Amino acid sequence: MGAVCVYSASMRIDPSEISARKIYRLMTFAIAPRPIAWVGTVSEAGITNLAPFSFFNGVCASPPTVIFSCSVRRDGSVKDTLRNLQAVPEFTISTVSFAQGDKMNLSATELPYGDSEFATYQIAAQPSERIRPPRVQQAKLAFECTLQQLIPVGEGPLSATLVLGRIVLVHIDDSVIDPAGDPIAENLDLIGRMGGDGYCRTREHFTLTRPKEK
């Protein structure tokens, strides 16, 4: 008797036939968990800003480069982070541990331009060594970055600008480093973004040994 093929019903979605908001929601549920870049910038006047971005990742190690996506607000206005980067092309990325989740969530609130999330939500700032924006003092790991490139993608609400930055200095708390010098996942205790208001904690993980090249 031959094998029986079973096909399950599936939904097909054409992004051109639904709103940007609906496809955004679908993407944020499907692309998960997402690491969180807690991005620190400063305005031309030197006022600090701190905001979380979950469309974030590394690009390459030579040169050490990171990327995050800064979307346009629903009303079509530019976020403070991008406005600051256009004036002062430097930024920090602080990691977000489970203990910092509430503060990170508060910093996602849209404040009037010129109001600092560091001051408003009493998030301690640590001065950087090579750039002007500070990092989150309590972050177990943080990058100091210089802006390499801004790449606009699309137009209007929920379009975005890709921000490419070069890492010029890394700060790692001694408590999260193993004898080999690698960060310890359990000690970092990072959180990841899921869809909607959902988050996950990255302490639960497993290992798969990479196959050897033939």
Image: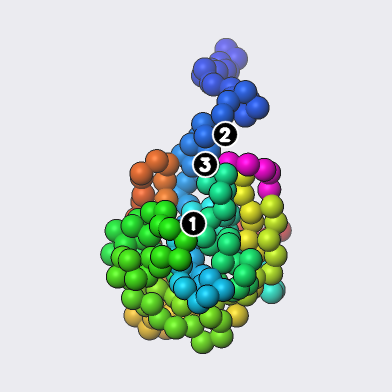
Of marks 2 and 3, the one in the foreground: 3
Outermost residue on the bottom side: it is 129
- Give the residue pinned by disc 1: 53
Q: Which residue is drawn at 51% across and 87% down?
A: 129
* Mark number displayed over residue 20: 2
Q: Which amino acid does label 3 sit on?
A: Arg
Disc 1 from disc 2: Cα separation: 18 Å
Q: Is mark 2 on a helix, strand or loop?
A: helix
Q: In which quarter of the image is residue 63?
A: bottom right
Name the spot of residue 85 as percent of width and height, x first: 60, 67
Sequence-wise first label, 2 or 3? 2
Q: Quadrant of residue 109?
A: bottom left
The crowd level at tag 3 (other Cα within 10 Å; few <14, some 14-19, many 20+) is few
- Give the residue pinned by disc 3: 74
Q: Is mark 1 on a helix, strand or loop?
A: strand
Disc 2 from disc 3: Cα separation: 10 Å
Q: Residue at x 57, y 34 (%)?
A: 20
Judging depth in this view, the residue of 142 and 33 nearest the camera is 142
Q: What residue type is labelled 1?
A: Phe
Judging depth in this view, the residue of 49 and 3 nearest the camera is 49
Disc 1 from disc 3: Cα separation: 16 Å
The crowd level at tag 2 (other Cα within 10 Å; few <14, some 14-19, many 20+) is some
